[in-house]
Amino acid sequence: MKVIYTAKDMQELSIQLQRQGKTIGFVPTMGFLHEGHLALLKQARAENDVVVLSIFVNPTQFGPNEDFDTYPRDFKRDERLAKAEEADYLFYPSVDEMYPGQASISISVTNRVDVLCGAKRPGHFDGVATVLTKLFHLVQPKRAYFGKKDAQQVAVVHGLITDFKFPIELVAVDTVREDDGLAKSSRNVNLLDAERNEAPALYRSLQEAKQLVESGERDVATIKAQIERTIKNNTRGTIDYVAIYSYPELEPLNKLDGQFIIALAIQFSKARLIDNIIMAI
Ligand code: PAF
């Protein structure tokens, strides 16, 4: 596996690979890889000639009071894991490399951003769309892999690829979970021991909601209330949101219909965890 540090080297390589008729599978990440990322790499390995992983903690998607500085980083460990998953290239640019000087153009995401995590993180998806636009131009993938845990991100990336006509297939991969159901996340390391013990209640509450739907419940308020009860009774976390929207449109619903997402975000002392399930009736 070769590590690439500059935008120029990355782009020259992808142009060369394109000329050779090789398909590039791209896994964009912010590093501190966990099994969720490894599942993306595995699928990319199975479906493409060449696999490119990027590690870049993107400052433009963090708000002023968010955890950019404390976001976990461990390049050597990531490099080892990526090698073990047989990634061919690891693109590891610096902030200056991705954002040299004052920007002259900004990307603003106008749809699906005022709900879920986007509502509390103004500008977050503008930063995600900006960095992905740059990365897509540099890596020129045929397929790009994203985890369904960030379901709003998947919906926004779908909009980015469609609106800007990137010739890229978006591949959404199932959430990888710990044995107790907790969704794998780089932020889980920031949970206190007691919070880590409580955190499986998040997925449990989603499973209870699923059972309610399967037993015929269609009222959104009733389902949300059940989830909130489980979170409050079993964790010391603060509910940021429990929400149900149509998916991938992310429009509000009173009664369940078609495909929808049941999503939650819970703030613990040093970690904000998200999880979701997507269902259809
Ligand atoms: O999901 C992430 O890790 C980031 O939002 C992404 C897609 C790598 C863009 O910085």
Image (cartoon, rainbow, N blue to C red):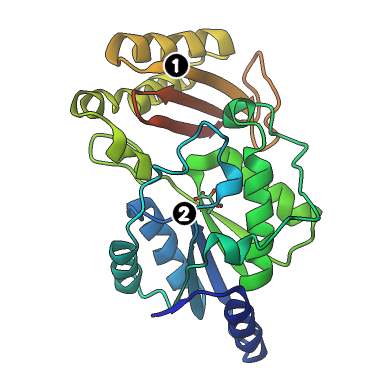
User: Does residue 261 appear in the picture of this structure?
Assistant: yes
> In what element is the residue under mark 1?
strand
| Residue found at x 75% / y 55% | 103
Q: Amino acid at mark 2?
A: Met
Q: Quadrant where the C terminus lies?
A: top right
Q: Nearer the viewer, residue 134 or 27?
A: 134
User: Does residue 212 appear in the picture of this structure?
Assistant: no
| Residue found at x 51% / y 27% | 263
- The percent coordinates of residue 151 (x first, y second) are 55, 40
Label drawn at residue 239: 1
Q: Quadrant of residue 119?
A: top right
Query: Horizontal placement of 11 versus 274: left or right?
Result: right
Q: Amino acid at mark 1?
A: Ile
Residue reaching furthest to the bottom: 20
Query: Horizontal placement of 221 versus 129: left or right?
Result: left
Q: Is residue 100 above or below residue 200?
A: below
